[in-house]
Image (cartoon, rainbow, N blue to C red):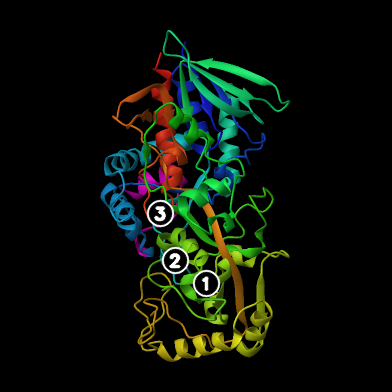
Amino acid sequence: MSRVIIIGAGNAGLSAAIAAHQNGAEVTVLDRGPADGSGSDSFYTGGLFRVAYHSLQELEAIVGPLGMDASTGVERYSSYDEGEFLDDWGRVTGYRFDVDLAEEIVGESYESISWLAEQGVPFLSGIIVDANGQARHSRPGWHGGFVEVSGAGPGLMRGLLNAAAKHGFSIHNDTEVLELEPAEGDRSVKVHARNGAGERVVYEADAVVLAAGGFQADSEWRTRCLGPGWDLAKVRASPFNTGAGIKMAMDLGASPHGNWSGAHAVAWSVGSGDAGHPSTNHIFERESYPFGITINTSGRRFIDEGSDFGAYTYARYGREILRQPEQRAWQLFDARTAEHLMDEYKQSNPYAAREREDTLEALAKRLTDRGADGDEMLRTIAQFNDAVDESQTFNPYIKDGRRTSGLEIDKTNWAQALREPPFEAYEVTCGITFTFGGVRVAGDGAVLDAGKRPLPGIYAAGEMVGGLYYFNYASGTGLTSGAVMGRRAGKAAAAAA
């Protein structure tokens, strides 16, 4: 029986562990975080997976019966095939991504997500019937290829941890891996670690799967790679993802790969505190900016909020906020646009960083007290309101072409004048989710050296895999990639002996 050690107990790591165990390996999982799963970035996600499918029957096999028929117009959600999935992924990354690896992930997305469902991960679809009796997705811009885990990230981790318990392999939490050492004379690997009691422990395995995340929680490394100011970004999720796994792989000769100066970074509430808190999870996300306007401390707009649906722009707008004075901004909405805000905006907590007033002048005074140029904000809003093409119908579920004209930065969709009280402002900064740079891997997850030769017994999955994201991120691809590559790496590691 082959011995496999998995480093990291998130979506990718536990997918690898379950697959390795199913393929006959003796599996041990080592994880720096606590036993509740909150040490992984997966815990802090919205639980969103992107999947290719060819019929409603295939989709319902994962999410359960949708209870709709042709009269509801549900046929528009009848498929999201591999070509559409790959094109979306390529479009947002400027087609710089590792297309061969992405193609394999897309091609195995349905099989892997079905496999997760078999393991007990509970999936659902956001497709609903609206008040007009027509099928639509509950979130603007989303489609049938988006499936969610019930309970979001915590629900995903509960499902995976329950599956791991049924398989019966060991998970050692509060255990920090310090070094990988190829053992002499054979293909095995020694794993040097420190347990929760501070004791040094050495494990030996025929293969190791590294699923220890990116380097987003290391302020020095992200500043060195991403650039000045990135030490000031808020870490959205796990404080344990400091790039240790990437460093260990590179110490063994792994080839660095991908967009090392890039990261998934979103608009994030300034009131969130530092690295992830399990009790708050992702409630500080601020992704509804397409339906309002965003201003900086100078009171001016600096992005086209309506360039695309949030699912295709949210992961790059954090970087734009970080470039602004004091690394902060405000998202502004009126009563008409506020009805389209995501649930995260509606959470009642003292850290929401929200201001609400019945007049724009009163709101400007509030923001002036917070360090913004309120007078310039009022001028910006007035110019924006005058520039909106009111003849075009507002529709949050399509790119409606309702735009402004003549502004320094025009808004190209969903332009809605801010006129109806109450008016709201949400103060945001940059929240970093994960980094894009990682190591080069083969299709089975084997870590490759500079000559594209596999390092014996070393595999990787999840955020550690480089080459999948450049500049931007297509939502739902991260968890899907983690599951597909984790499962593949687990299978390959089990066969490594």
Give how far across and how far down residue 207 sits, in percent: 45, 20
Instruction: Identify the mark at residue 340; answer none if there is no mark.
Output: 1
Marks 3 and 1: CB-CB under 8 Å? no
Q: Secondary structure at mark 1?
A: loop
Q: Secondary structure at mark 3?
A: loop
Which is closer to the viewer, label 3 or label 1? 3
Which is closer to the viewer, label 2 or label 3? 3
- What segment is highlighted magenta in the picture? 55-71
Residue at 38% across, 56% down: 471
What amino acid type should be assigned to the residue bearing mark 3?
Answer: Tyr
Instruction: Identify the mark at residue 140; answer none if there is no mark.
Output: 2
Q: Is residue 90 left or right of residue 479?
A: left
Residue underneath mark 3: 473
The earlier-in-sequence mark between 2 and 3 is 2
Residues 71 and 48: in front is: 48
What amino acid type should be assigned to the residue bearing mark 2?
Answer: Pro
Residue 69 visible here: yes
Marks 1 and 2: CB-CB under 8 Å? yes
Quadrant of image for the C terminus:
top left
The earlier-in-sequence mark between 1 and 2 is 2
Give how far across and how far down residue 270 sits, in percent: 63, 64
Quarter where residue 143 is shown: bottom left
Q: Number of callouts in the render? A: 3
